[in-house]
Amino acid sequence: MMRNSLVKMYHAMGIFKYSAISENVGSASNLKNDRNSDDRSTAAVRPVGCDDCPTESIATNVDYEAWVAAHPSALSSFDRMMNAAKGKKIVVFLDYDGTLSPIVDDPDSAFMSATMRSALREVASHFPTAIISGRSRDKVYEFVQLNDVCYAGSHGMDIMAPPRQQRSCDGKFKTRGVDKMGNEVIIFQPAQEFLPEILEIFNELKEVTKEIEGVTVEDNRFCNSIHFRRARTEDYGVIEHRVMSILSKHSNFHVTRGKKVMEIRPLIEWNKGHALEYLLETLDCFDSNDVLPIYIGDDQTDEDAFKVIRSRGQGFPIIVSSKPKDTKASYSLRDPSEVLSFLLQLTKWRRNSSSSMLNMKGFFA
Ligand SMILES: O=P(O)(O)OC[C@H]1O[C@H](O[C@H]2O[C@H](CO)[C@@H](O)[C@H](O)[C@H]2O)[C@H](O)[C@@H](O)[C@@H]1O
């Protein structure tokens, strides 16, 4: 009752906005805020410009409906979206965890369903398709196991793409290789020089967290993830403190946060948004007015890609969330099952339409 009155009052005052309360690295309380939510940006709904106002901890259906009005469902908006896409080259970008697979307690068990794999295979047979994940590139491939998809791991710091003409990124950070099908590929790794230190940090993180129950450290090749989903709440303070003390010894690194995970990453100007731009360029799609990127993701790191699509003025940034959250995405899907429905609709639409497309078959593995 009290809560509803407050929400109404904030709406009336025009100061109501969904805000990320634990987005930045800070005190142990940041981890505590993560406790009741999968999602760092939706743990609470707080009125902007009102730091002393009580935090709303439960986003109601009413809140969700208001949020969906601002970020319409990509399923119910599908026809409108595809009308705008007619005659354009659609390029599909997807995040992995929380988008293609549901969030689960054990990061090693975040398997993609066979139905999702088959839908993705279909999508990739019609549109250039790339997965941009925080995981290591090899790990995502292990989960997805599709060869017609392009993979970018470590939040875009490890990209395997076809050897097309690339303008802005000269030969720097690139090596030639072959994919699992034997096709020639270019591997782009802008954080190569940090690898020895990343490994050092991994070992240090393992050491300082080894006695904390429920904490695991994941090697994502160009970044390290410290998972605390299975840890006890009373240990959150010590986890944060130990991670930050390791970070303080490595000035070329910073911490970002995800869903009950902290990540130590090299301080370079490269994120999922840059990876999206790089891939569009690789696919010869960068400058074209005819190109329409669709990006589907659920986490804070996906926001960088949403921003890039917005700044291009063409394309569909779609957030996966069942709760209101602050986002640059224009559309929304509730969860991976809605992502699946969207991918199925996309394939169906493509089959029934005569839109132009790029045939990328055989380029990726
Ligand atoms: O960019 P993404 O593909 O979304 O990867 C982001 C992180 O996802 C994984 O962690 C998250 O999913 C796990 C499995 O559901 C879950 O247990 C964990 O709590 C989540 O944070 C992955 O393990 C991380 O390395 C990625 O950075």
Image (cartoon, rainbow, N blue to C red):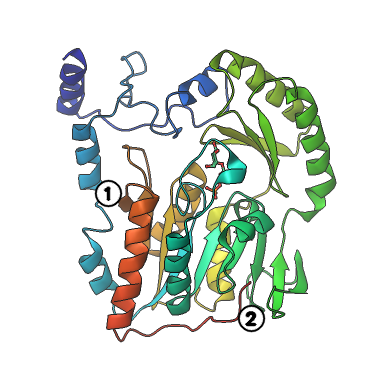
Q: Residue at the location (62% across, 50% down)?
A: 135
Left or right, residue 360 beside residue 138: left
Residue 137 in view, yes or no: yes
As drawn, 53 above or below 289: above
Q: Earlier in the sequence, mark 1 or mark 2?
A: 1
Q: Which secondary structure lies at badge 1?
A: loop
Residue 266 in view, yes or no: no
Q: On the image, which quarter does residue 252 sit in?
A: top right
Q: On the image, which quarter does residue 20 sit in?
A: top left
Q: Nearer the viewer, residue 189 or 183?
A: 183
- Work out how far the residue at label 1 is from the one at label 2, CA to CA, in angstroms: 36 Å
Quadrant showing the N terminus: top left
The residue identified by callout 2 is 165
Q: Where residue 71 is drawn, which disc sits there?
A: 1
The amino acid at mark 2 is: Gln
* Residue 251 percent across, percent down from the top left: 76, 34
Q: Nearer the viewer, residue 204 or 300?
A: 204
Left or right, residue 299 beside residue 210: left
Q: Nearer the viewer, residue 3 or 54?
A: 3
Left or right, residue 87 beside residue 31: left
